[in-house]
Image (cartoon, rainbow, N blue to C red):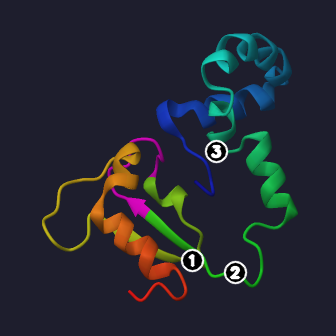
């Protein structure tokens, strides 16, 4: 999720809050409600402090070949293109065959996703 998600318009709402100067106040109210349920949820929103920090440090890391597995109907990574880097090898699911759509939480259990991971690993024999 290199560029975060825009699910439910949260990234746009967060940016408006930053522009208005209310971000810190909203965050102070949000943290005690959200963090006990999902401490990392805020960090996957496009434009989050974590993602800004990572990109300012230089993501992706030079010299590493990346393979990004992207599902057209991910449901969590919105839009799906936010799951890939411009310099990575991108495997888009479902592929050209008539396979069913693969949602985000099903990716670790999907045979096509598993095959793409094994193919990307050096020395995997795939």
What element does badge 2 sit on? loop
The disc, 3 or 2, on the residue closer to the chain's N-terminal end is 3
Camera-nearest label, 1 or 2: 2
Give residue 55's position: percent from left, percent from top.
Answer: 78, 59
The verdict on residue 71 being magenta is yes
Residue at 47% of width from left, 46% of height from top?
Answer: 78
Q: Which one is in front in this view, the residue at disc 3 or the one at disc 1?
A: 1
Q: Magenta-highlighted stretch: main secondary structure?
A: loop
Q: Nearer the viewer, residue 88 or 38?
A: 38
Of label 1 and label 2, which has the lower sequence position? 2
Q: Position of residue 50 (x, y in %)?
A: 77, 44
- Label 1 SS: loop
Looking at the image, is mark 3 or mark 2 nearer the viewer?
2
Disc 3 marks which residue? 46
Q: CA distance from mark 3 to mark 1?
A: 19 Å
The residue carrying mark 2 is 64
The spot of residue 120 in percent (x, y) is 49, 80
Circle 3 sits in a helix, a strand or a loop, which is it? Answer: loop
Dot 1: within a 10 Å radius of its alpha carbon, few (fewer than 14), some, or many (20 or more) residues?
some
Left or right side of 10 for 35: right
* Picture quadrant of residue 108: bottom left
The spot of residue 61 in percent (x, y) is 77, 73
Residue 75 magenta: yes
Disc ID at residue 88: 1
Q: What stretch of residues is rendered in magenta?
A: 70-79
């Amino acid at each position: 999720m290199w560029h975060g998600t825009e699910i439910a318009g949260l990234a746009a709402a967060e940016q408006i809050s930053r522009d208005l100067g209310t971000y810190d106040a909203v965050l102070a109210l949000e943290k005690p409600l959200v963090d006990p349920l999902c401490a990392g949820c805020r960090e996957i929103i496009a434009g989050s402090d974590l993602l800004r920090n990572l990109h300012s440090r230089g993501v992706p890391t030079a010299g590493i070949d990346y393979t990004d597995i992207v599902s057209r109907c991910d449901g969590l990574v919105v839009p799906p293109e936010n799951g890939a880097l411009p310099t990575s090898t991108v495997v888009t699911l479902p592929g050209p065959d008539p396979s069913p759509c693969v949602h985000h939480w099903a990716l670790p259990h999907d045979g096509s996703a598993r095959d793409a991971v094994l193919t990307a690993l050096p020395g995997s024999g795939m």
